[in-house]
Image: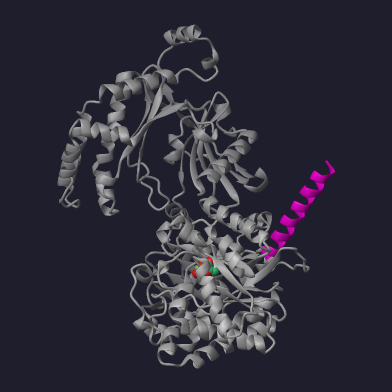
Amino acid sequence: MYSIDLPVPPAFVITTQAYKNFLISNNIMEKIYDELKDFDVENNEELQRRAENCRNLILSGEIGEDLKNEIIEAYDAMNINEDILNVSKSALDLIKAGRSLPYVAVRSSATAEDLPTASFAGQQATILNVKGNRNLLNAVRECWASLFTARAVYYRVQNKFPHEKVFIAVIIQKQIQSTTAGVIFTVNPSTNDESEIVIEAGFGLGELVVTGQITPDMYIVNREGLTIKSKTVNEQDVKLILDPNTNQNIRKPIEEEDKKKQKLQDYDIIKLAELANKIEEHYKFPQDIEFATENSKLYIVQTRAVTTLGKVEEIKEKEEGKIILKGLAASPHIGTGKVKLVEDVNNLDKVEKGDVLVTKMTNPDYVVAMRRAIAIITDEGGISSHAAIVSRELGVACVVGTHNATQLLKENQLVTVDGSKGFVYEGAEEIKEELKEHYEPQTEIETITKVKVNCDLPEAVENALKQNPDGVGLLRLEFIIAEGKTHPAKYIKDGRDEEYKDLIKEGIRNLAKRFFPRPVWVRTSDIRTDEYRDLEGGEEEPKESNPMLGLHGIRRGLKDKGILRAEMKAIKELYNEGLTNISVMLPFVISPEEVKETKKILQELNAENIPLGVMIETPASVWVIEDICKEGISFVSFGTNDLTQTVLAVDRNNENLQYLYNELNPAVLRCINYVIKVCKKYNVETSICGQAGSNPEMAEILVKFGIDSISANIDAVRNIRNIVNKAEKRLMLEAARMHSE
Ligand code: PEP
Ligand code: MG
């Protein structure tokens, strides 16, 4: 926060390395870990005893001379504020000599603390109003020792965090004797509404607000435009302040005329919201921030990721008592129905029309039952998982990555699923579907950047057409394959190539016809070896330890050429029927050689005239894009579901890592920007067909990058067209203004 110029109080940090050195130089590291080895944490007496032994080892340890001197020197320098630093050396010495040491807050920050998934908040010590060298060094040791309170040891064992992996840093921060203090959430914690910033403020030190001992003022600020949406001013009778005579925090009654006063002025509310925005932008995740004001100056004293789960559940539960489960919002619809727990494909039949399908994770075999379901809930997966993609296309509510839906929900239990928030309620809840821009009447807008649609399910064609897209930017074959109930490899193995070709051909024809002459980009099959095992012959697929990086996409097609050839042949025959709007797109490409080999197959089939494109889903395809262009392709399409996964090394299906999975990560954006630039040079059309194409923020960025088209989910097409339209207008206006200057 300091490095991005936020108003943090003067501070310094004693790093985790210093803590490690302390353990090593006192020879107590092994002793501590031995103490915590092999014992039952449920045995409270033993837990207390062992934890105390660890703490005593630390509290009686010696802080080495070097570190001690550095701490004292840094503490010493703290009282000199930056303006004073500009004065001459001799003046500085005088100031130094005459001043007293400052009060500081000594706070701990453990390495596994404050993850979005696990808040270890409050586990380690914070010591307020510390003054003097000796007190400071003792407080540092106390912070280190607090890593081994019985509570902290127990929590780590329960959460499977090895003790050896957790280290602790200590932050020495100038104590703010606050007139007002409180908390800012960059997402409304009671509704999860990201358009609102919520500020809670009370008089005095922040502790009374944070611990809920007073009812603070609450201000809600609109994130866009930073205007105050609402203010609730609450009366406060008592505040916590430092008594300088005793060095203790004391409760002081508030003067009668101040009790009903608004705690923060409007301009401070706005200023705090602005700072909060900046902090969230920096950490790329909703934040829970603590602030304080002193002498009319605002300070940010702490920030951490919102552990949304806990807070939202807590608050919502208090309000409604009905949320029983939370996961990732995967498809923005609402559905009420009876839970049907599906263990595997063999009990899909029990899902009747209007039921809520609950399972670990869906796969293409589940689509038949998914069609009958009113909502879908899964234990695993992120927002680009199979369940999420198909639900959006079917227009049913979906919540993924709940961890334990299959254990928590009971067969036939009535639940309501809110796929826009990721909540599951007990019973039939009346929840209004939020009106999204695309539900509003919209006169047809022409954009220069084309807006296409992703359409995989044959029955979704009419709905897709209603959105008036400029074509189909992605038609996945997997859903057509699942309908055939046999694994592609099996057809080829049994010499039933023609049958496979016909399945694909019939599956595509109607869609290509209905969209004609608008372009339809058909992707050759992209089957991970763990996805299709329930299809006939699927069990013969190799077992891979990491199917996401395994034998799928174009590498599979080139290894098992019969599959690729049959798919190409299907497309060629349709092309020859006059459906010349079809193009072929290759998934998971990593080299120009793959394009070359594929072209050979097209040649053998006399189908070189069919336009060929590749998906950009790997860092390799990004860095060899120039060579790929030289090989001769017509278009590329960013498969950001995979590209994000492969660039960030974050498994897209791992719900525990969703906080890192971000298509807008600068590393991903730079890949996209680079590829667009190279493609422009070679006149190769650029598009996107990953989930990120439905994200307005991404759409705006892509327009700026100069992408040729964006392919969005059916329900996002209209909204994205509006976004694209506005972004284009803005760019044109900027250009015109620049020109006229
Ligand atoms: C992608 O990776 O972005 C993509 C569109 O392909 P899939 O989701 O099928 O892997
Ligand atoms: Mg992909």
Compare residues 98 and 522 and report the one nearer the observer. 522
As drawn, 77 above or below 671: above
Quarter of the image where one finds residue 629 = bottom right
In the rendered structure, the answer to whether residue 18 lies left or right of residue 224 reads: left
Up-down relation of residue 148 to residue 242 (above or below) = below
Part of the protein shown in magenta? 719-741
Residue 90 position, x and y percent, is: 48, 6
Is residue 66 found inside the magenta-colored segment of the image? no
Q: Position of residue 106 (x, y in %)?
A: 37, 29
Residue 738 % position (x, y): 79, 44
Q: Position of residue 93 (x, y in %)?
A: 45, 8
Main secondary structure found in the magenta portion: helix
Q: Is residue 226 above or below residue 624?
A: above
Q: Identify which residue is drawn at 16% across, 50% down.
A: 43
Residue at position x 15%, y 44% from top? Answer: 34
Q: Nearer the viewer, residue 204 or 171?
A: 171
Q: Is residue 418 visible?
A: no
Q: Quadrant of residue 717?
A: bottom right
In percent of the image, x 78 and y 53: which residue is there? 732
> How many numbered dots are placed on residues in this image?
0
In this rendering, position of residue 524 left or right of residue 357? right
Residue found farthest to the right: 740
Residue 310 visible (yes or no): yes
Is 740 in the magenta?
yes
Q: For this rendering, which residue is in front, 16 or 558?
A: 558
